[in-house]
Image (spheres, rainbow, N blue to C red):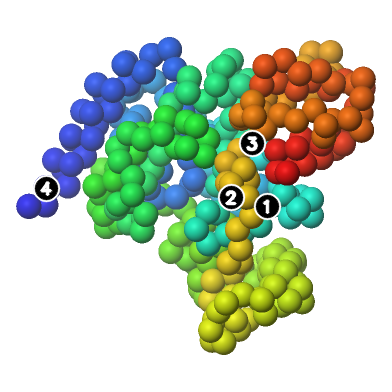
Amino acid sequence: MQKPLATKVAETVKYLRALWPRLEGRHRFVAFSTGKDSLAMTAMLYEAVEPEKPICLYSHHGLEFPSNLEYLGELKDRGFAVSVVNPFLGYFDLMERGISFLTRKNPWCVPMLVGTGMLEWLQAQGARSPRKAVMFRGMSGSEYSHKFHTRLELYKRLDLPTFNPVLSFTTEEIIEVIRRRYGLPPNPIYEHMGRTYCICCYTSDARRQEYSSRHFPEVCVRYYGQIEHMLFDSGLLDKAHLLPEHRTKEEKLGRHGFVHWNRIKAQNVVGAVKRRGRSGSLVYRIRETSWINAKHLQPVKGKWSIRGTEIRFWDLDEKKADALIKRMINC
């Protein structure tokens, strides 16, 4: 039998209130998407631990709606502790460098465009590894993939312990919690689409594409132009074992907007996190020791050192250092 909403909320708040002090000593934060699920979850967390205001991290990049920042300003005025982080590299930077492609089953956008900014923030807080942190994530029963998640899990692509407190809530319940219990405004972007994902997204639908192409035509032309080039101009699609109806532009661009293509496993996770040393050096922490291969660093011989899982560069242009690290972990 379905529990009354008031009971579900009370139980969730009670759970969060008991959980919070047990996580003392860890770097605790909310992964805030500006969507309704993360808003409801954060409101319940704030009620549970008041007067404390846990930090909400929002990762903003070139494919995010600019209006999200205005919405965050409104939430800040209402007492939300929101901090904006930025990714290691932007979407088009990654594409131009050949770092990653969009994939149907393993989208790299979450770890690469969202995760890197959060990991750099954790490093700045003094976290020695993602395992020393805890992420609170708003994922409700409205998410198609919610059945594959549990209340506590390890978010493997970031190697980050994660709590999902609102998995049992439906979309209707989330909206009622936001509006009636907490009196909060949902993101205005919901007036134009059902989800608060990016301007262009691998799960895009016709309604989102219509809105985005009208308001952000240059971004859409560039985004879908790259996909069209990779699929149709390259001949890649002709080599795929697909039925004719699954090779059309409507199927690949108009309906979905993503590429059915997968590269290597290393790019489905964050492979390295960068920080700047006090002396101006660049320090990259590599995810796995086995990914470190000094032969890829030989072009700048004498300007780097390796210690454990860290590679340190000095007197080297940052773009060149980025390229060396990306090539190393993706080859």
**Residue type (three-letter) at the residue carrying disc 4:** Lys
**Residue type (three-letter) at the residue carrying disc 3:** Gly
Q: Kindly tell me whether residue 84 is visible in this rendering.
A: no
**Residue type (three-letter) at the residue carrying disc 2:** Trp
Percent position (x, y) of residue 164?
34, 39
Q: Are marks 4 and 2 in contact (CB under 8 Å)?
A: no
Label 1 secondary element: loop
Q: Is residue 273 left or right of residue 305?
A: left
Which numbered marker is on residue 141? none
**Gap in Å between the C-alphas at discs 3 and 1?**
12 Å
Q: Earlier in the sequence, mark 3 or mark 1?
A: 1
Judging depth in this view, the residue of 191 and 8 nearest the camera is: 8
Name the residue tied to disc 2.
108
Q: Earlier in the sequence, mark 4 or mark 3?
A: 4
Q: Is residue 14 left or right of residue 34?
A: left
Name the residue tied to disc 1.
100
Q: Are marks 1 and 2 in contact (CB under 8 Å)?
A: yes
**Mark 4, mark 3: which one is toward the viewer?**
3
**Gap in Å between the C-alphas at discs 4 and 3?**
42 Å
Name the residue tied to disc 4.
3
Name the residue tied to disc 3.
271
Neighbor class of circle 2 (other Cα within 10 Å; few <14, some 14-19, many 20+) is: many
Label 3 secondary element: loop
Name the quarter where the C terminus is drawn. top right
